[in-house]
Amino acid sequence: MKPTDFSKYLTDYLIRYLPTECGMSRNTIQAYSQTFMIFLRYMSEEECIKPEKLFLRDITKQKVISFLDWLEKERGCSVSTRNARLATLHSFFRFIQYRDVEGLKQWQEVLSVRFKKCTSPEMAFLTIEGIKLLLKQPDTKTEYGRRNLALLGLLYDSGARVQELINLTPLDLRFGETATVRLQGKGNKARIVPLSSSQTENLKRYMKEHSLFEPQNAAHPIFTNPQRNRLSRVAVLNIVKKYAGMARKIMPTLIPDNIGCHTFRHSKAMHLLEADINLVYIRDFLGHSSTLITEVYARASEKKKVLALQKVNPSIVTNKKTTWQKNGQLLDWLKNLQHQY
């Protein structure tokens, strides 16, 4: 069977263009590939066009819009996921428009499909007390518990993304006067992050128990499953969810419901910010490409907002109740007032 123009361009896009010309990481390419797998399924099941018979001319603006609606209605995807899938299709058709100029009008119509507006979800992060409570949950009497304590502690202490964490090997760690970990981030950019003394001790004990200081294990994954294979992202998420659930039963107010692996990264950033660490240093610590990305933590920090207002005018913001807050009759009047209009 003769390959279609879509299959030729898609192969070139994923195999050559993204990794070679754009320098995309393997994880990013996998995410893009996943979008096309879902898109091919949609075209086959909903538009009755099998992958081996799909040509570029079949991918119209209306079909792309229908695909996006299908993602939300049939697959239950969020608006942010919908927009991420559209961003992948946009990237592909920007690639196409310089290689197939005869269909330029059609490609630009696809590129004109707009992203859907959505409200940003509230950032989930833990207080220092919440982190401490969660890290008390692993049972260190068991091998499984000791591994999970080291994993969760490092996830918070380094502010690592989950993929950065599961890719770690002993070669990435240095235990000198200041212990550090080398993290390979997005776009294959590496950064060196210092570790706290308490996390260093946990990590050393865990690595010694599993012979990870031995030269023959220098390139072995640090965190593995019982089969000694590298942990998956889902496995790490399950670990986080398990101990978050245990901690929530003890102190529900300290552990939000929407906790995930990235919560530890958010929490570390917030704690650095509240310790008056400059945004530039936090940017470098997290491996962000710009402080514009890091500024989201400044906008989310209620504590910083209160402190900033206190500096402007200490008499305006206070932890004590004002006179009108103590006046029950006045408060009742204000509450009733809103129902009169």
Image (cartoon, rainbow, N blue to C red):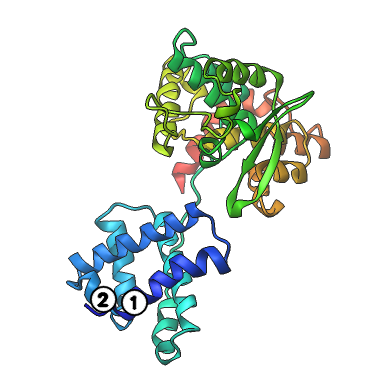
User: 328 or 120, which lies in front?
Assistant: 120
Residue type at the position of mark 2: Leu
Q: Is residue 1 left or right of residue 77?
A: left
Residue 175 in view:
yes
Residue type at the position of mark 1: Phe
Residue under pointer 1? 6
Residue sticking out furthest to the bottom: 102
* Residue 153 against residue 295 in the figure, above or below: above
| SS assignment at label 1 | helix
Please state the horizontal and vertical placement of residue 237, each as a whole percent of the image.
43, 33
Q: Are marks 1 and 2 in contact (CB under 8 Å)?
A: yes
Please state the horizontal and vertical placement of residue 337, each as a whole percent of the image.
50, 40
The quadrant holding residue 207 is: top right
Q: Is residue 96 left or right of residue 213?
A: left
Residue under pointer 2? 54
* Residue 82 against residue 61 in the figure, above or below: above
Residues under labels 1 and 2: Cα distance?
7 Å
User: 89 or 296, which lies in front?
Assistant: 89
Q: Residues within 10 Å of mark 2 (few under 14, many from 20)?
A: some
Residue sticking out furthest to the top: 141
* Residue shown at 42% from the left, 69% from the top: 89
